[in-house]
Image (tube, rainbow, N blue to C red):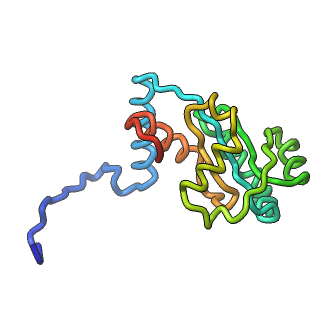
Amino acid sequence: IAHISIPLMHYRQHSNSMSTNWEQRINARQDIKFRHAQKRQLKMQVVGLILVDDLDLALSEFMGSDLLENAVSTLRKSRNVQTLEIIGGGLHLEQRAQSLNVSHINTTIRDIEKLSFEEYLQIVRSTMGERSSHSDVAITISTRTPFITAQQIDEAIDTLALYNTDSV
């Protein structure tokens, strides 16, 4: 079919429709997934991993704190994440992790953005080692992505549980 000039569906918007409010729609969708996950009692052990490949960037100021503290705060706000780990190398990172009361796995990670998904997954698995056997799900975030919210993380975990997928 080269050109379709007839609409396949007509959409009529009601005056009190949520479709004009993006945030309200997203919140409603998240709430529906959360309620379905709760009904099915899908509770998983979730570890939040913060991957630090550039310490200077991780300690850059962002909205009154640094990017590393922002990532820790985001994961702590999640209703699903039980354990936090900071993965990266260096004594200064270890000290910063202690000041944030987060455990630290000392390993060197370079050029995260250049890694394939398989390479990235291998780094996470190898650095987590035996710790990963105690978790059902690993959420990985980077200090390079400061605008991810706890609500987005929770929705991803609910999606993972509801649709029985291995990644989101």
Q: Is residue 104 above or below residue 93?
A: above
Total residue callouts: 0
Name the residue nearer the viewer: 138 or 127. 127
Task: Describe residue 27's horizontal placement relative to residue 47 as left or right.
Answer: left
Task: Describe residue 108's horizontal placement relative to residue 119 as left or right.
Answer: right
Q: Is residue 56 above or below residue 125?
A: below
What percent of the width, then of the height, locates residue 103?
79, 39
Task: Describe residue 14's horizontal placement relative to residue 9 as left or right.
Answer: right
What percent of the width, then of the height, locates residue 123?
66, 50
What percent of the width, then of the height, locates residue 135?
61, 31
Quarter of the image for residue 59 reads bottom right
Q: Residue at x 11, y 77 (%)?
A: 2
User: Which quarter of the rendering shows the N terminus?
Assistant: bottom left
Quarter of the image for residue 101 reads top right
Name the residue nearer the viewer: 9 or 72. 72
Q: Residue at x 62, y 30 (%)?
A: 133
Name the residue nearer the viewer: 8 or 88. 88
Task: Describe residue 161's horizontal placement relative to residue 77 as left or right.
Answer: left
Q: Is residue 77 above or below residue 1?
A: above
Name the residue nearer the viewer: 134 or 151. 134
- Residue furthest bottom in the image: 2
Q: Residue at x 53, y 40 (%)?
A: 154
